[in-house]
Image: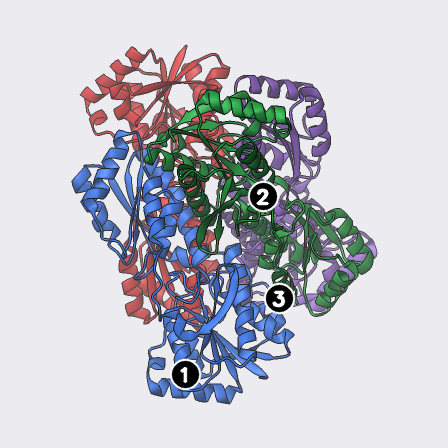
Chain colours: A purple, B green, C red, D blue
Amino acid sequence: MERIGVLTSGGDASGMNACIRAVVRTAVSRGVAVVGIRRGYDGLIRGDAVPMDAESVGGILNRGGTLLYTARSSRFLSREGQQEAVDSLSRLGIEGLVIIGGEGSLRGARALGSDWGVPVVGVPATIDNDVAGTDFAIGFDTAVNVALEAIDKIRDTAASHERVFVIEVMGREVGFIALEVGLAGGAEAILLPEVPVDLDAVSQRIVEGRRRGKTSSIIVVAEGCCSAVEVGRRIHERTGLETRETILGHIQRGGTPTARDRVLAARLGHAAVEQLLQGRRAAMVGVSGSAVQASDIDAAWKIGKTIDLSLYRLAQVLAI
Amino acid sequence: MERIGVLTSGGDASGMNACIRAVVRTAVSRGVAVVGIRRGYDGLIRGDAVPMDAESVGGILNRGGTLLYTARSSRFLSREGQQEAVDSLSRLGIEGLVIIGGEGSLRGARALGSDWGVPVVGVPATIDNDVAGTDFAIGFDTAVNVALEAIDKIRDTAASHERVFVIEVMGREVGFIALEVGLAGGAEAILLPEVPVDLDAVSQRIVEGRRRGKTSSIIVVAEGCCSAVEVGRRIHERTGLETRETILGHIQRGGTPTARDRVLAARLGHAAVEQLLQGRRAAMVGVSGSAVQASDIDAAWKIGKTIDLSLYRLAQVLAI
Amino acid sequence: MERIGVLTSGGDASGMNACIRAVVRTAVSRGVAVVGIRRGYDGLIRGDAVPMDAESVGGILNRGGTLLYTARSSRFLSREGQQEAVDSLSRLGIEGLVIIGGEGSLRGARALGSDWGVPVVGVPATIDNDVAGTDFAIGFDTAVNVALEAIDKIRDTAASHERVFVIEVMGREVGFIALEVGLAGGAEAILLPEVPVDLDAVSQRIVEGRRRGKTSSIIVVAEGCCSAVEVGRRIHERTGLETRETILGHIQRGGTPTARDRVLAARLGHAAVEQLLQGRRAAMVGVSGSAVQASDIDAAWKIGKTIDLSLYRLAQVLAI
Amino acid sequence: MERIGVLTSGGDASGMNACIRAVVRTAVSRGVAVVGIRRGYDGLIRGDAVPMDAESVGGILNRGGTLLYTARSSRFLSREGQQEAVDSLSRLGIEGLVIIGGEGSLRGARALGSDWGVPVVGVPATIDNDVAGTDFAIGFDTAVNVALEAIDKIRDTAASHERVFVIEVMGREVGFIALEVGLAGGAEAILLPEVPVDLDAVSQRIVEGRRRGKTSSIIVVAEGCCSAVEVGRRIHERTGLETRETILGHIQRGGTPTARDRVLAARLGHAAVEQLLQGRRAAMVGVSGSAVQASDIDAAWKIGKTIDLSLYRLAQVLAI
């Protein structure tokens, strides 16, 4: 293999740049040329490509986002779009492809690998962490820490006003961010898509906490579960306490990646290139415990990835 | 004067704790006893008070919020409420009062000082910075830096997706936070209550920026000016570009105070006690340039405090 | 078991407070009383103890250090000291003990458990991460992220002056912090106790990097390997480049714990109490992959814990 | 004036990039071309120059250091060196020069302006803040906040071990950083070049603090005053308390600039270009209270800039 491509796709995640750097420098150290494809699958279809060398990824390790840009592509969902992408790869002389992104992006990678025979390795990168085949996706740890910092700040103001704060965090259909942030932030309640919501019970816990001397209450809500504003309104109705709502929003995507996300990005980017050079096609790389592992790309969704309910119960015990 | 009181009132601001510490320790060093009144004017009416000594304010210098709690009081707006407050002061043996808060809180301080003859000194503390008689209120610098960090994070994701981001910051009726954050964050446009909004011009600037190669655009909107969601919708209509909105919300109130806010809090808290001991009544302290100054408390609103429009024009020049 | 004790010992680590909170609230939720023993084993010998309830650990989740204080005890190394500790436990009515600390502290826990028959469970907490029986010790992730932030800052100034910076990080006899930080920070070289140091090779890499256009070089040195000042002097002799040295020092111990350290602390603190209640004696808890596990306390040192050399080689590939 | 140059010189300071951006974009908006001179006066002598346009300063607003590199030049101290610099300016077609740096850099600017007739405007940028003619130099606020964060972290570990920490901060011959950080960080003592050091008094204060229940003590030492290690040794001799020392070092130079430093950099960079275009030669710009002002460049050192001793006394009152 003499030339490979790399692209980022879907929602951006902090650490994507660190991963691009690892892909490029690993390839260069193995004597393989690298082409950066910009703007995801759409860019691939259009041949929006730049040659990359070791220097081109200098100074990006600590920067959020992706210097290759990212996008969601509807065109690539069709067979015609995929044909164009394959033609484009051939025109660009790209023999293998590393695709960095979330579940949708990895499904695209599977199409290229399984249906069209392109050697492809996917790297899971999504703040939502909802990709199976890996314990952690790139960007999750940073998103959790950014949300946690926000909650620490809001705790100050909540306690000063003795208010109930309802904080909505990202996570699409799953509660990974909300659970981790809620446990780490000492939230008095965590509302997840995976657990039936019982606002009566939540209200009762809050009222009991007040009785014991708690001056603030934080409720963390996963966006895939319910609306923070709605939750605030109902808690107020049930408890009579003052409530406020905050939707953390896009700050969770950005910011300097944490050490953990940078190390994960380095390891997975490196492993992806190694897998390509070993002839893998339609594979993904991930981390299991402290080991990097390669799987068939179907592993990303074959077994649904679920939150650890023991952490949910632990959060309830600790928030008394 | 043998015993003074201190209270925080209105919206909390980072640095209030540092100010309470300065009030208490200055008083202690002058041989004056201090009573902390909790929960603002309502607490004063109810006599919700705790004695404070030098140790009681240890370890709070770097913490957001206020350990005395804060609240808005409707009861205190009435003459009856004020009478109860005065009675309460007398029962508690408090001969002078330091009141830390924003414009509404200082109006309350004026009532106590001018109408009821209570020696009172006000200390301006509000993230909105809309108190005259001082260049800066406690909490403003921290709020600006917190919002700026958020904007730096959002810039990463905006650039990766080539989106227009509309970010709503706090500030009530005034644009101090928005202007400072917009200039410091390199916002492509800043929408303030003080300047007529021209979304056609903003849209044109954004489109021209894209033509010259800009991949992201940040629009900072003051809450007192317009709704981020509305602005996003209209910019999208005019430019066809993808837009996203974020309302930063209550994180702007909290967090560890900056060095500037801690030093300001130390100086103003100290000066407030000195003014009380010198027999001032219905005064406020503030900072002008590098000097601390004392004024009649009316200075807080007599001359409206306005943003510096030259900074607004500068931001436009620099965002090309 | 009706009453348990908890203490922190040895060097402090961020997340110890989160762990104390988890111990106390888990015990309370199980109807078990908790006594906090202050100042480590010395405090235990002296009976320096305070009763703890759910409220006493409120507001500490996000604070570095340990509210129980910590110390190293030489007295406890002797049989007499241990006898006094056992007597003290008996006087205090403590039937089981959770000990939070590093390797030395866990050896003390083993003595109490194996030699004196006290039910004891150890929780690994040390920024150095040099405790076996767990993938990660509490405090390691925070220390790494604090050091990484420092390196990001120094990179700015290094690049502006085109200097070589030698940065010494903590880690006692092992290179865990240095390796993780060096890889995440993109260090041009990492000097570890576990790998022979070859300053000729390092110098050559730096000179070659300069030739290819690199404007800064960062060398991360583990304190257990060599002196930053010495390394700086030798690199300067070999390359003629300007060098500067920084010893990061104690900032690595402190600061708000990361999400990962808080979640780890919550899980291990909870598990330690569960183990005690199940009758374990001389055990430790740890994390393996995503699972919490309990082991005989000897696991903490029986098999030496070693750094992952593949990460070291990866760092070399990526720093080209 | 059709073409101007801009250079950074001396020690780097956070906000230099924001200032370069302001210089470039202001000039561009006025129809004036800009040349970036790299590596300070040495680069000027060698003609190390790059053309700059509005896009070339995109994305640098929030980055520490200086993209133009910086250096100290011994050659420029001689008349021959200055002659070469003047020749170089003429060859590059540069008709006016903005020089961003500390006191030494502004002396160089004076030489070019007064002795050689080059239109030059200096912008004060130095973390030490030891330039007169302005209340604040670019980089000072960031350095203070970085040092303050470090002190907050060290306070955690100091309190956990009940130790005395001696922390050395930068500042060359003056105590600006130390005083600001010491006051904001609640240091129990601040040692400055401007105030005679009395370690007996400091020791006594610390011992008294312990008696009243303080569990940690922080001593902030300015590098221009004395050695942290020496201070630690002597405090230990006098008090018997455990002491530790940390030299914060180069992290103080770097990092994302604060809002205040970015706004200051924007205002001063803009004003410098305006002054050049108005025909000023050998001038400097600075900030006085909330106003930007221009002065003869001699103002930078004519009246020595001194610390505010009332802040020193305030810090002593508050640290009881």
Distance between the alpha carbons at the discs numbered 3 and 1: 30 Å
Q: Which residue is mark 2?
A: B252
Q: Are marks 1 and 2 in contact (CB under 8 Å)?
A: no
Location of the N terminus of chain B by quadrant is top left
Residue D25 location (% of width, % of height) = 60, 71
Residue sitting nearer the eye, D273 or B274: B274
Which SS class for mark 1?
helix
**How many residues crowd mark 3 within 10 Å: few (<14), some (14–19), many (20+)?**
many
Closer to viewer: mark 1 or mark 2: 1
For marks 2 and 3 on the same chain, the one whose residue lies earlier in the sequence: 2
Residue A65 location (% of width, % of height) = 61, 54
Report the amino acid beneath label 1.
Ser
Give the image quarter of residue C56: top left
Give the image quarter of residue D104: bottom left
Distance between the alpha carbons at the discs numbered 2 and 3: 25 Å
D300 lies left or right of B121: left
A139 lies left or right of C311: right
Which SS class for mark 3?
helix
Which SS class for mark 2?
helix
The residue furthest left is: D237
Q: Chain of mark 3?
A: B
Picture layout, residue A178 above or below residue D121 = above
Residue sitting nearer the eye, D219 or B109: B109
Q: Which residue is mark 1?
A: D114
Report the amino acid beneath label 2.
Gln
**How many residues crowd mark 1 within 10 Å: few (<14), some (14–19), many (20+)?**
some
B47 lies left or right of D144: right
